[in-house]
């Protein structure tokens, strides 16, 4: 019963990649995140699910400071998140993020999308950055599209470019916010395949998704959120087969109906 | 819902029922009607002109004009021809348009970005600026600046002054003018040299980035070189350029450049009015860039300034530039309101004074309109080229 | 495994994030740079606005019959003493009720047609396009037993409104025809319409007005005499219909191909298809655009000053030259500016709200 908590404690804080302690956030008067505690160890793969509006996106966006929190601590790789711009920049270099709507830069080619940050943030020589970008594009299986513009690609291809673009910064953690929910069914698989591969290589991943198959195959833990708090947290097996909380049961019954 | 489709009985093939032939006949009728109208108009005009004893043709362009113009960029007095008058007016239009475009762009971009500021007060002030200036007729604004502000300024003796170098009075704005002496040419040479070396440095910085990944502060270096080198040349050659500061001599100022109040009023009004439109274009251009773009750039670790430079501005510019061009065109056309305060632009000296002197309304108005039309065509041509080049590749 | 069965109750946001202080902290003082910006802007506003407010309200004089009523501050007496002239121009005093009747109709029509849900809008439109213009014409210029009033006596706000309303209403049908012509499949028609549109859009209105005032009389046989107002109106309508055509064309382009195909499949001919299917949709879509061109036209009517008509701006300008009232230029322009601003600003707000309504209508 206590395994996952014990594991986290035994592993000690130096192998904790992300630590959220009593995290609270408000939008105006609306209390979106309420006392969130979460520790993600290096190499752990976590899937977050929950009903719409439960604060999943908000939580992972706090991790790379796309949203500001008001109370509690966020510690990434031993560095506490403060208002210090240097800290924020450092954290953003270590944390990659993939969005629901890809957010590729439409005025740049696929290759330029991938090399923009390495060149300007990591200060890599362009040649080197391009070589690395090509490697990642090969890994997501679209090296032949490198000179096209995002608008010329399918949704699935665009999302794979977005993943490659994040990987080019050589991040320690990858955040995914519903990476497949804007895709047509036949494209979902090609993106999930890439994500599974990434997981198998030991990347630390935090993934908001309702793809239960994905959760079952790769997740170490599944987290269920509702009304801005973590309601239940468990290994995928027990989470799906033996949910404890009423709210989890209700949620699972709803998504399994589809 | 049930509908019965009854086939119409096959129509007999009247000539009139063939759409192609119908279109052809229609077009012929319209052409004939328009040509006929044009013929009647020309006929009427010629007979009217004859009755009034007005000559036709473009010979008047070489006649002596007999009137002076208060501001001219080229040598001109009353002994010059009407053709020269045309040139003077055109140059004055171009002068106020170019100055207006530069100023309106600067003000417009500042206000447009200000409207999006996360500082509430700044955003509100910029919003109020836009709502005030674009909802008042430009002509009224020109008249206001001219009659209510500049015409009520004190006489030259009581001029408003800034550090005793800039003077403003009812006769206009007086600013220092550079006087070039022998050796001043070296400053120009230094400037050219500076520009050339900036180009070389830019190339070198790109190469270095390619090879080693190190970036180089090209912008600041360029700024230092472009300002520093001519300055150095100025000192080395014994300061051959100095500023002639306007000074009160008798009843008026001598020396320096005098900007006539008509130009000031027109320029202020055109700038403020057009800037309010440009600000809106800039705002909507930036807003048109999806918020996800900023977030993606931030998530990749790009700092705010780089995100602006590399992600937001290149995308916003595609949206901003086409309406910007039409605002520039509007400014050029609106500069013709100069005639209301007597600034000698093309319309005032040519379609105004010259027309009154010669009475050759048809020729003069056609020439004037053609000039503006040509400028419009030029702008839309450039715009089309730009759009073709910038169109985002889509599936 | 963690199970958290007890929901955490929502708490109010920390004080620093809430209420007026939280708001100020976020919107005005979120960083040192922002604080400086706020303070500097606030200070500039203060030193800029206090004299303006004190001049225009606190120290201002409002009523009286001549300039002796004014001492320091704005002399609004100049306006209040002449307000009738600014509204009616030189229209005979005992006949001004006729102008008032037209104003009244205009106001009622606006109340009828502008709000979203009003009964019988269709009848309102029909009234606005038939009875209203005809009755206004006779009321303003006379005839049918009413005393004739020459157009050179028209002026002030009334003339401004006449120019703008006639301009927009007359430009609409021409604009629609030109837009259809520009999208026509007949090359000759397309050529003429495109040329017409681009020529007028390429030249300044003032040259068009010059043309209308000096060239138009040359174009017609000597016996035909246009009065100055009619000449100005002809110029304005030609100019305006070119802009209107572009607005309508935008609407026509936005109609999906399927609509054309469906209408053609129903066996509708070109004119029936346009009248029954395409134009109703296209025109509805471009109402905000039409309001925007109306705003532009409303401001542009002030240009008739240059060819010697006395619209609101011109009559204020003329009042400034009155020897008894010299030196009140600022008051005059501020008043005229405010009137124009009030009309244009309200119309632009209206067009924005329409745009929003249309946009959401599409999504729903
Ligand atoms: N910028 C914002 N301002 C105010 N409220 C916001 C903002 N962003 C999100 N919210 C609110 O915060 C709550 C949580 O939003 P969030 O996007 O984190 O939900 P989510 O769990 O990701 O939902 P979904 O599955 O729909 O993406 C929602 O109720 C949302 O309306
Ligand atoms: Mg979400």
Image (cartoon, helix red, strand yellow):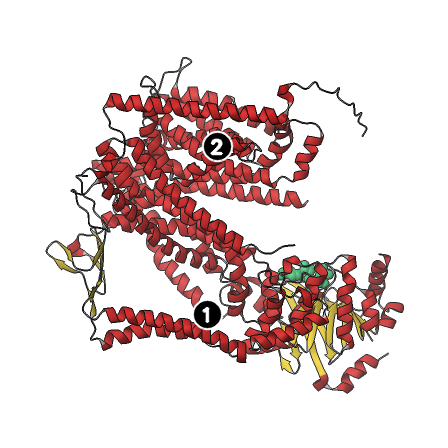
The disc numbered 2 marks a residue on which chain? C
Q: Residues within 10 Å of mark 1 (few under 14, many from 20)?
A: few
Residue C312 in sight in this render: no
Residue B376 placement, left or right of B247: right
Figure quadrant of the N terminus of chain C: bottom right
Q: Residue at x 64, y 75 (%)?
A: A132
Label placed on residue B3: none
Coordinates of residue C179 in the picture (x, y in percent): 53, 34
Secondary element at image label 1: helix
Figure quadrant of the C terminus of chain C: top right
User: Which is more foreground, mark 2 or mark 1?
Assistant: 2
Residue sticking out furthest to the left: B250
Question: In the depicted view, which residue is nearer to us: C82 or A165?
Answer: A165
Residue sticking out furthest to the top: C145
User: Disc 2 versus disc 1: distance between alpha carbons?
Assistant: 58 Å
Coordinates of residue C59 in the picture (x, y in percent): 31, 48
The relative height of residue C173 versus residue A250 in the rendered view (above or below) is above
The disc numbered 1 marks a residue on which chain? C
Coordinates of residue B294 in the picture (x, y in percent): 58, 64
Question: In the depicted view, which residue is nearer to us: C338 or B16?
Answer: B16
**Quadrant of res B51:** top left
The reply to whether the C-beta atoms of the residues labelled 2 and 1 are less than 8 Å apart is no
- Residue identifier under label 2: C192
**Quadrant of res C19:** bottom right
The relative height of residue B166 versus residue C73 in the rendered view (above or below) is below
- Residue identifier under label 1: C33
Coordinates of residue C307 in the picture (x, y in percent): 31, 33
Question: In the depicted view, which residue is nearer to us: A233 or C243?
Answer: C243
Q: Which mark sits nearer the N-terminus, 2 or 1?
A: 1
Residue A100 placement, left or right of A255: left
Secondary element at image label 2: helix
């Amino acid at each position: 019963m206590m395994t996952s908590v014990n594991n986290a404690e035994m592993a000690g804080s130096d192998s904790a990649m992300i630590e959220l302690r009593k995290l609270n956030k408000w939008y105006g008067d609306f209390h979106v995140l309420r006392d969130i505690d979460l520790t993600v160890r290096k190499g752990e793969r976590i899937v977050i699910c929950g009903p719409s509006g439960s604060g999943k996106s908000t939580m992972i966006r706090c991790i790379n400071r796309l949203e500001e929190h008001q109370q509690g601590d966020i510690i990434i790789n031993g560095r506490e998140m403060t208002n210090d711009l240097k800290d924020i920049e450092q954290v953003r270099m270590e944390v990659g993020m993939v969005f629901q709507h890809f957010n590729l830069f439409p005025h740049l080619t696929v290759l330029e999308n991938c090399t923009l940050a390495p060149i300007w943030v990591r200060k890599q020589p362009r040649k080197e950055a391009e070589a690395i970008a090509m490697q990642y594009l090969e890994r997501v299986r679209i090296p032949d599209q490198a000179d096209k513009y995002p608008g010329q690609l399918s949704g699935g291809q665009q999302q794979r470019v977005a993943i490659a673009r994040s990987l080019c910064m050589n991040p320690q953690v990858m955040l995914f916010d519903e990476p497949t929910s804007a895709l047509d069914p036949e494209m979902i698989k090609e993106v999930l395949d890439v994500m599974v591969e990434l997981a198998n290589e030991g990347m630390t991943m935090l993934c908001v998704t309702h793809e239960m198959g994905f959760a079952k195959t790769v997740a170490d833990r599944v987290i269920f959120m509702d009304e801005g708090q973590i309601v239940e947290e468990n290994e995928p097996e027990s989470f799906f087969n033996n949910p404890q909380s009423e709210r989890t049961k209700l949620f699972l019954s709803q998504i399994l109906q589809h | 819902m049930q509908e019965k489709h009854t086939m119409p009985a096959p129509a007999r093939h009247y000539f009139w029922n063939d759409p192609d032939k119908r279109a052809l006949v229609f077009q012929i009728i319209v052409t004939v009607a328009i040509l006929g109208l044009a013929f009647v108009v020309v006929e009427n005009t010629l007979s009217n002109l004859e009755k009034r004893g007005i000559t036709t043709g473009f010979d008047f362009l070489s006649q002596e004009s007999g009137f002076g113009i208060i501001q001219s960029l080229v040598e001109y007095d009353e002994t010059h021809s009407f053709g020269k008058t045309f040139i003077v007016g055109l140059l004055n239009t171009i002068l106020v348009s170019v100055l207006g475009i530069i100023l309106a762009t600067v003000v417009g971009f500042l206000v447009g970005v200000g409207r999006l500021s996360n500082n509430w007060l700044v955003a509100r002030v910029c919003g109020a600026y836009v709502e005030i200036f674009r909802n008042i007729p430009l002509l009224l604004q020109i008249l206001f600046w001219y009659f209510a502000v500049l015409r009520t300024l004190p006489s030259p003796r009581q001029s408003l002054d800034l550090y005793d170098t800039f003077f403003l009075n009812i006769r206009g704005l007086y600013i220092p003018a550079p006087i070039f002496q022998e050796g001043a040419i070296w400053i120009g040479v230094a400037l050219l040299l500076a520009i050339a070396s900036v180009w070389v440095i830019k190339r070198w910085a790109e190469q270095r980035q390619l090879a080693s990944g190190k970036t180089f502060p090209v912008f600041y270096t360029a700024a230092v070189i472009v300002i520093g080198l001519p300055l150095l040349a100025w000192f080395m050659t014994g300061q051959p350029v100095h500023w002639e500061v306007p000074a009160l001599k008798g009843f008026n100022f001598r020396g320096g450049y005098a900007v006539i109040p008509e130009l000031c009023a027109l320029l202020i009004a055109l700038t403020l009015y057009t800037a309010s439109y440009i600000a809106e274009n800039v705002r909507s251009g930036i807003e048109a860039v999806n918020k996800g773009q900023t977030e993606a750039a931030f998530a990749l670790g790009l700092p705010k300034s780089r995100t602006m430079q590399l992600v937001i501005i290149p995308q916003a510019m595609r949206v901003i530039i086409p309406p910007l061009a039409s605002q520039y065109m509007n400014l050029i056309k609106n500069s013709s309101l100069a005639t209301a305060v007597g600034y000698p632009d093309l319309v005032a000296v040519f379609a105004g004074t010259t027309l009154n002197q010669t009475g050759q309304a048809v020729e003069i108005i056609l020439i004037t309109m053609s000039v503006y039309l040509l400028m419009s065509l030029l702008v839309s041509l450039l715009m089309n080229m730009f759009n073709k080049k910038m169109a985002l590749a889509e599936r | 495994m963690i199970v958290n069965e007890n929901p955490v109750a929502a708490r109010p946001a920390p004080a620093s994030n809430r209420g007026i202080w939280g708001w100020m902290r976020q919107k005005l003082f979120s960083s040192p740079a922002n604080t400086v910006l706020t303070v500097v802007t606030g200070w500039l506003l203060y030193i800029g606005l206090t004299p303006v407010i004190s001049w225009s309200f606190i120290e201002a004089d409002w009523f009286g019959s001549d300039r002796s009523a004014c001492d320091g501050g704005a002399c609004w007496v100049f306006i209040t003493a002449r307000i009738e002239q600014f509204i009616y121009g030189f229209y005979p005093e005992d006949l001004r009720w006729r102008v008032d009747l037209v104003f009244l109709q205009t106001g009622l029509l606006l109340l009828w047609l502008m709000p979203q849900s009003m009964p019988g809008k269709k009848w309102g439109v029909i009234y606005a396009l038939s009875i209203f213009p005809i009755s206004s014409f006779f009321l303003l210029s006379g005839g049918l037993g009413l005393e004739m009033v020459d157009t050179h006596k028209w002026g002030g706000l009334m003339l401004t409104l006449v120019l703008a309303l006639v301009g927009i209403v007359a430009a609409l049908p021409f604009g629609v025809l030109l837009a259809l012509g520009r999208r026509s499949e007949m090359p000759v028609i397309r050529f003429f319409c495109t040329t017409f549109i681009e020529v007028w859009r390429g030249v300044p209105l003032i040259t068009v007005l010059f043309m209308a005032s000096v060239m138009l009389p040359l174009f017609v046989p000597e016996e035909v005499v246009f009065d100055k107002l009619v000449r100005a109106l002809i110029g304005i309508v030609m100019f305006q219909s070119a802009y209107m055509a572009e607005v309508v064309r935008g609407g026509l382009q936005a109609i999906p191909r399927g609509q054309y195909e469906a209408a053609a499949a129903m066996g509708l001919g070109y004119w029936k298809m346009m009248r029954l299917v395409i134009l109703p949709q296209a025109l509805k879509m471009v109402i905000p655009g039409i309001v925007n061109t109306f705003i532009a036209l409303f401001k542009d009517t002030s240009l008739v000053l240059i060819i010697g008509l006395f619209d609101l701006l011109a009559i204020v300008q003329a009042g400034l030259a009155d020897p008894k009232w010299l030196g009140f230029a600022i008051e005059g322009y501020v008043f005229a500016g405010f009137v124009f601003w009030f009309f244009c600003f309200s119309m632009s707000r209206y067009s924005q709200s329409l745009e929003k309504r249309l946009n959401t209508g599409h999504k729903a």
